Every structure is written in structure tokens, then in C-alpha cells.
Image (cartoon, rainbow, N blue to C red):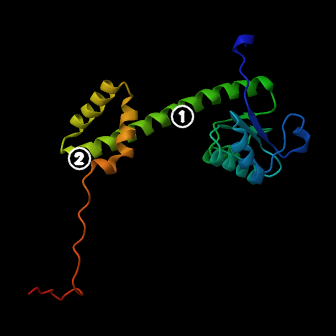
Amino acid sequence: MPQNEIQQLRVLIANEKRDRLELLAQVYVKEVGAVTARERPDVALVGLGLHSEHALDLIGEIVREAACPVIALLSAKDPAYVHEAAKRGIFAYILHDDPEELASAIDITLQRFAEYHSLQGAFGRRAVIEQAKGILMARHAINGEKAFEMLRGHSQHNGRKVVDVAEAVVESHLLLLPPLPQPAAHAGPPGFAATSE
């Protein structure tokens, strides 16, 4: 990679095998979530050590606590472990400690993770727009197309993104909707009619 294209990555490495400590640093399950949240790595590498359950727990904890992809490092083929690790959220796995293979896996993983986040963001934006359309449809007794035209028109008039307008509608929808009817007060227990003179 040319010098001007080299980017620095923050990498979390978790492995329990003593003979690989020169290449990998040791992190325990109870600490890995806090370390990941605090350090916010770009990618996490989890080595399969003596106990596959321990490594799977590490993967699960990192995926739960952090917004970074996880790559599993294996010293031998283990399809059952790869299957379980995939269910826990790994983005890739590599065999052996080949630096070129690792660099390629990190590159591919970061690209796929960026695409994943982009899709996740698009789905989130679409959901907010749909919520705002629903609110406007209920408030103004209009169809979805008219509601979207309202969002888009406001967006263009105010120089804001449609999703920002939609978020504002969703956040302030209680102000846009009429108050809910209050239940009638009962004068007595059910089954008894109140009388007035």
C-alpha cells in the first residue's frame, strides 16, 4: 500500500493461547466489553485458544458491546467453531498467522462492515420517514404520497434533509396530534345509574 494510503487502525486482540502472545494480546471475557466500549477499536481479532466456548464468549461480548467487526483467528480448520462464531457475529475468519492473509481479511471486513452500517442507516432513515408519514397522514387525513410531499416540500423550503424533517415530526408528534379523549368519570360502581335532579 502506498505511504499516503496507509491508515491507522485501532485493533482489539483477544486470545488465550500462551504461545501466540507475541502476536496477540490477552483479554479476558469480563474485561473485553469494557475495553471495547472504552477504546472503540476499528476491528477485533479473536483467536481460538484452548477452549472454544471461551473464544465464542469473547466474540459474543465484543459484538454486543461494540460497533466493530470481529475476525476469528484459527490455527487449524474447525467448521463447527466457524459456524458457531458466525452465529455470534463474526465478519470473517482466517487460518494461521500469515500477515498478508490477516491484512486482506481486515481490508475485506472493514469494507463489508462499512456497507453493513450504510444499509443499517438507510433502514433506520426509512423507518423514521415512514413514522413521520404515518403521523402526518393521521393528523391531516391524507394518503402516504401527500404526506411524503409535505416532508419533501418542508425539506426543500428549509434546506434540511428529508430524514431530518421526519425526525423532527416524530419527535414532536405529540404536539401535532389532538389530545386523546378523556374517559368519562363514573358516578358509581358499574351497573348503577347516576341520577340527577
The image quadrant where one finds the N terminus is top right
The type of residue carrying mark 1 is His
Q: Which is more foreground, mark 1 or mark 2?
A: 2
User: How far separated are the C-alphas under marks 1 and 2?
Assistant: 33 Å
Name the quadrant containing residue 12.
Answer: top right
Q: Is residue 21 above or below residue 4?
A: below
In the picture, the disc for residue 117 is 1
The type of residue carrying mark 2 is Arg
Name the quadrant containing residue 36.
Answer: top right
Where disc 1 sits, the SS reads helix
In the picture, the disc for residue 129 is none
Instruction: Tell me if I can see residue 83 in this picture.
Output: no
Residue 57 location (% of width, % of height): 71, 52
Residue 111 location (% of width, % of height): 60, 26
27 lies left or right of 61? right
Q: Nearer the viewer, residue 73 or 125?
A: 125
The image quadrant where one finds the C terminus is bottom left
Residue at screen point 36% across, 44% down? 170
Residue 112 location (% of width, % of height): 58, 30
113 lies left or right of 197? right
Residue at screen point 39% across, 45% down? 171
27 lies left or right of 168? right
Taking the view exactly as shown, the residue that stands out farthest to the front is: 197
Instruction: Tell me if I can see residue 197 in this picture.
Output: yes
Residue 50 location (% of width, % of height): 83, 50
The residue at which mark 2 appears reads as 139
Residue at screen point 39% across, 37% down? 126
Residue at screen point 71% across, 21% down? 7
Among numbered discs 1 and 2, the one appearing first in the sequence: 1
Q: Label 1 crowding class (10 Å Cα cut-off): few <14, some 14-19, many 20+?
A: few
Q: Are marks 1 and 2 in contact (CB under 8 Å)?
A: no
